[in-house]
Image (cartoon, rainbow, N blue to C red):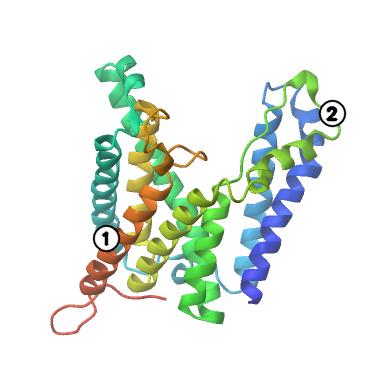
Amino acid sequence: MRVFACFMLLIAFSLACMAVFTYPAWLLLHPHFNFPFQRIGERIGMLGFLIGFLLIARRLRLGDRVSLGFGAPRRVYLREYGIALLIGTLTMSLVVASMAALGLLDWQPAARYGAGALAALIAKRLLSGVAVGLIEETALRGVMFAGIQRESGTLIAIALTSIIFAATHFLGVAHIPADAVTPWSGVTVLHGTLRAFEDPLGNADAFLCLTAVGVVLANVRAITGNTSASMGLHAGWVWVMLVVHGLSRPNITSPLSFLLSHHDGFTGWLVLAWAVVLGWGLARFYSARTRAPDGATVQPRGA
């Protein structure tokens, strides 16, 4: 479990950087730039993670293309990414359709969008989905998955990366006005980042749902041997989810509103049920896809 421990230390290190260095950085930047204090803290945490990530990947010999999840030939990788992006978009659209059919979404915010604004929203959310998929899949189901799999086996890699995947979605933001910044504001930002963990039972539905989604993506990564499919699925799911967030809001008056979590108004028991169904279907699909009828490998496993 040495690899997993290293990544846990890396996460702790990035959070510590946020608490310690945000205030000094704000003192240097605020006279010249009007950056919000919490945004500086986020960037410092990301920078600390990136620096540590590069050091760990190199030290643990996880910096090669295969460990990063890009082991398939470029043509194959892009083809499989495109197919998975389409599958992710269609399947998440089915999830949204089920929410709408159950009366869980209020579409009043969509009324303020004209054709141009709607097209811009869809395009921007696509870029966000692609970016999220690239970053999270490379870090979690690329390097971290490869390291844990090499050391402890595939099942442990699927389980641990899925738990971390879920946990990272509960990192929040504390908003601090410029006139309220003190030398202790970095600690305040850190507390705000971890606030969601103070109510584990209240967020249990979202956490279980996100863990299940992580298992689905990690299993696809294990089957295919690279991140092309998991990254495409992830991007498609995030794309649709972000578009829906812009066009609707949870219908809290619905008697079935408990099916959506209070955490983000989207994940929850309904998406958890969908994740189980989709996980089974995607596992069968990619298991069949990785082997031709004669038994020859269609995609290099590269794990």
Q: CA distance from mark 2 to mark 1?
A: 50 Å
Q: Amino acid at mark 1?
A: Glu
Task: Please give left or right for residue 24 compared with residue 87 in the image.
Answer: right
- Residue at image coords 72%, 56%: 12
Q: Amino acid at mark 2?
A: Thr
Q: Which of these two is toward me, 206 or 110? A: 206
How far across and how far down the image is residue 110, in percent? Answer: 32, 21
| Image depth: mark 2 or mark 1 in front | 2
Locate the C terminus by quadrant. bottom left
How far across and how far down the image is residue 274, in percent? Answer: 32, 54
Label 2: element kind: loop
**Residue 76 image-quadrant placement:** bottom left
- The vertical placement of 240 against 72, above or below, is above
> Is disc 2 surrounded by few (<14), some (14 to 19) or many (20+) residues within 10 Å?
few
What residue sits right under mark 2 in the picture?
Answer: 182
Task: Please give left or right for residue 98 compared with residue 32 in the image.
Answer: left
What residue sits right under mark 1 in the picture?
Answer: 80
Q: Residue furthest front?
A: 255
**Residue 25 image-quadrant placement:** top right
- Residue at image coords 38%, 44%: 238
Q: Earlier in the sequence, mark 2 or mark 1?
A: 1
How far across and how far down the image is residue 14, in percent? Answer: 70, 51
> Is disc 1 surrounded by few (<14), some (14 to 19) or many (20+) residues within 10 Å?
many
- The vertical placement of 58 against 84, above or below, is below
